[in-house]
Amino acid sequence: MPLIELPLAVVPILMNAGAALMPAILGLFASAAALIFKPRELFRLFVKKPLIPVSILVGALAIYYGWGLIGGGQTTPAAANKREANPNVGSSTDWASVALEILRQEELARAGGRTITETPEAGREVVSSSEPLIYRKNAQRTGYAGGPAPVGLLPLWEYREENTMYLSSPLPAGDVVYGASCYLDPPASFGAIFCLDAATGKVRWQTDVENPETQQEFTGFFSSPALSADGKNLVIGQGLHLDANAELICLDAHTGAVRWLVKTPLHIESSPAIEGDIVVVGAGAIEKGADHKPEGDPLGSGHPGYVFAVRISDGKELWRYDLVDPEGSPAIENGIAYIGSGVNGAAVAALRIASDEELKSAGQERLVWKVKTPFAATGAVSLVNDLVIIGCGKGDFVFSDPNPEGVVLALDKATGSVRWSTKLPDAVLGAIAVNDGKAIVPVRNGELVALDITDGRILWRQEDPKKRISGTAPLLSGPAFTGNLIYAASRDGYLAIIDPANGAILERVYINAPDRPGELGLSFSSPFVADGRVYIGSETGGLRAFVGKESR
């Protein structure tokens, strides 16, 4: 997360020559002055890294009072006697090593725009596959990458920074897990993108500045990362709902170095979809007021939103297509991107992802079809067989509607015609997981529902609040569905394992910090099951990995 990089000058390297201390003293006071005149940075530093400002103060006092002891001022006889009586007295800290480490961090940051917590392991193989890894793993949004499905969950590791939320969903890829964070510092937010060892939770790399020269920090992340099929490029959107001037970000998946940035006047809460060398994502409207009308972007135009595509290999933006509030995550198949239109839009669109030049040459339009939906289509699109499945409804991730309604639609991929429609008691905002002929649907009223994908028939639902994950606490994130088990999380921070045969809760664990419950109800991260582990983020409990006493 955002932190203040300390320059080399703040590290007091004690030497015998008193004159050598002057740069350290000047550096310490310069650092202190910089903090005083940047109250936001000072507050964040005290909250997140309290030892740093304390160390600066202690170091400054030590140098000041020690100046006379080593030749920088008048030495009293008592001090001289103490020094002679104990000639080995000195600093127990190897300040030279500390200084060299800070230099190393600065050089690595300049090279890749990174804040390195731990050097990436040399020679680690790049994860590659025949398909890219996107939000919830694939277009079926299963949140499952194979291997055992654990039960009897036990905590394996936890990655957490103080006062930091993990709204984004983790993306396991081989022996690592990618994630992103959000640190609220109203009216702004800050974020970091990171890569952890899947088995230990140790940091491989962490990036929190987009420009190492200006130290421009990332804003907070709601979007979840996607990985190109060759395993080399990690792509993620930036910004929360009221943020402007956000960017689509591409990083070197092995080192965390920023490869390119594509700026928008809006924000990108949508999670990217990838096919070949093209990534597609939605830039959502900045809505304010009771009427949720788009306003407040830097151009003053109240832009309603658009979908755009970027070539991954060089970061060139290929096209933009205006679509009202495309906050959900698109899915791509055979050169067609399917994406929902949210507040004030209420539609699903199918768009060809080829460049303008390619479409012109082929005599094709970008829009394949566009279909109106009963309510805002804010959720991620799921693809299975010849169907496009998406949830809709009244209400959003923060506010419920006084007259809630929801629906799941299955549309024909080729034409957009409605194949079936299933009404539900509240909005469906999270991704719908499709596996084994079932669609597992998270509903805002707190219940999980299973539908038959052939006709939309309800197979089971958790109507009784006492038999849900956490009563009426909303389900806003997508479930993971292995075929044998379902893993789903409530907004107030409970992760549950559910029987896919009847919807019965088999077990549940609390994922927020026990000493700091998620009072804001912002546990939006979706669980991901891979290689016998369950990964999930939370509002206060960090990004966590669980293993099981046994598996299915």
Image (cartoon, rainbow, N blue to C red):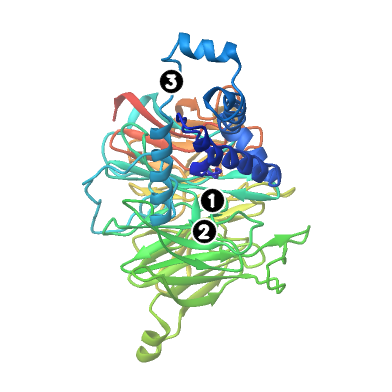
Residue 416 visible in rendering = no
Q: Residue furthest top?
A: 85
The amino acid type, in three-letter code, at marker 2 is Ser
Crowd rating for badge 2 (residues with CA inside 10 Å; few <14, some 14–19, many 20+): many
Q: Position of residue 140 (x, y in %)?
A: 38, 54
Residue 293 visible in rendering = yes
Look at 39% across and 39% down and name the residue there.
101
Q: Which mark is residue 221?
A: 1
Q: Quadrant of residue 202?
A: top left
Residue 276, relative to residue 146: is it above or below? below
Q: Which mark is residue 270?
A: 2
- Check disc 3 and report the residue beneath it: 92
Number of the front mark, 2 or 3 = 3
Left or right of 237? Residue 188 is: right
Left or right of 280? Residue 348 is: right
The quadrant of the image that shows the C terminus is: top left
